[in-house]
Amino acid sequence: MDRFVTREPGRQTRHSFSFGSSYDPERVSFGPLVAFNDDLLGAGAGYDPHEHADIVLVTWVVSGALRHEDESGCVVQSAGELAITHAGTGIRHSERAESAATRFVQSWLRPGTVGGQPARRTTRPELGAGDLVVVADGRDLGVAGAQLRIADVPAGSSVTVPVAGRRYVFVVTGALVRSSLAEPLAAGDAFEVTGDHDLRLTAGVPTQLLAWSFAGENGAV
């Protein structure tokens, strides 16, 4: 509930970092992660054509389906699919819920090298039974030392987030039991962790976790 919120007809977005007109100098970025947005769209609602450049957009559809349109055409991204968009020198695209209410989380990262040809790739990662699975790494993202993991964790099961210079762990759905770091976390809550101590999390109910890790204190190797 501490996240910034943007509400428009047909959509609600919760921002984990400063975004648009919402600014907090202490919530600007976390390593190369400069935005983490949790979007809920009504059927047919979304974002009209808009532009990006020199940013990497990583989109995970939680429920429903997201229609993405740009100069190259239209792609419908279903729940359980991950899209990585390299804006490069510039893209213009729109994003809308295809036919039903849709929730997606989208990360924005600063790339290691700006410019270049825009590109987009969609995959459907196979998530293991309770394991954090690497679904994107530095080569996919153009961000050295970055990894993205996702897990569907059964109730009562635990996962360990590998040590890294910076770790950002977001509870997509479900809830965790109390840990030594904080009160129980539920959907929409997150850990931001620096240092080399273990981070072991236990699901209180069936839970989906999304975990970013970045090498080095500033997200660089």
Image (cartoon, helix red, strand yellow):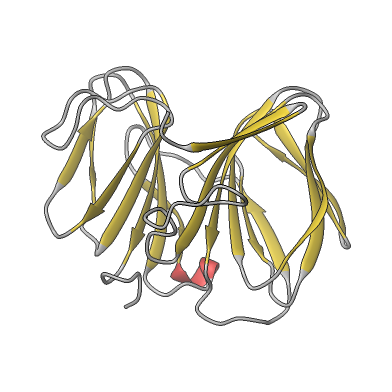
Q: Quadrant of the N terminus?
A: top left
| Residue 62 place in picture, x, y as percent | 57, 32
| Residue 119 place in picture, x, y as percent | 71, 68
- In-image side of 165 versus 38 (left or right): left
The answer to whether residue 11 is above or below residue 135 is: above
**Image quadrant of residue 194?**
bottom left
Q: Which residue lies at the image location 15% right of the left edge and 31% below the top edge?
A: 179
**Image quadrant of residue 60?**
top right
The answer to whether residue 77 is above or below residue 1 is: below
Q: Quadrant of the C terminus?
A: bottom left
- In-image side of 196 versus 68 (left or right): left
| Residue 42 place in picture, x, y as percent | 74, 24
- In-image side of 174 versus 113 (left or right): left
Q: How many marks?
A: 0
Of residues 217 and 26, which is closer to you in this image?
A: 26
Of residues 72 and 169, which is closer to you in this image?
A: 169
| Residue 83 place in picture, x, y as percent | 63, 52
The answer to whether residue 96 is above or below residue 114 is: above
The answer to whether residue 20 is above or below residue 153 is: below
Q: Which residue lies at the image location 38% right of the left edge and 65% below the top edge?
A: 31
Of residues 130 and 108, which is closer to you in this image?
A: 108
Q: Which residue lies at the image location 30% right of the left edge and 27% below the top edge?
A: 185
**Image quadrant of residue 37?**
top right
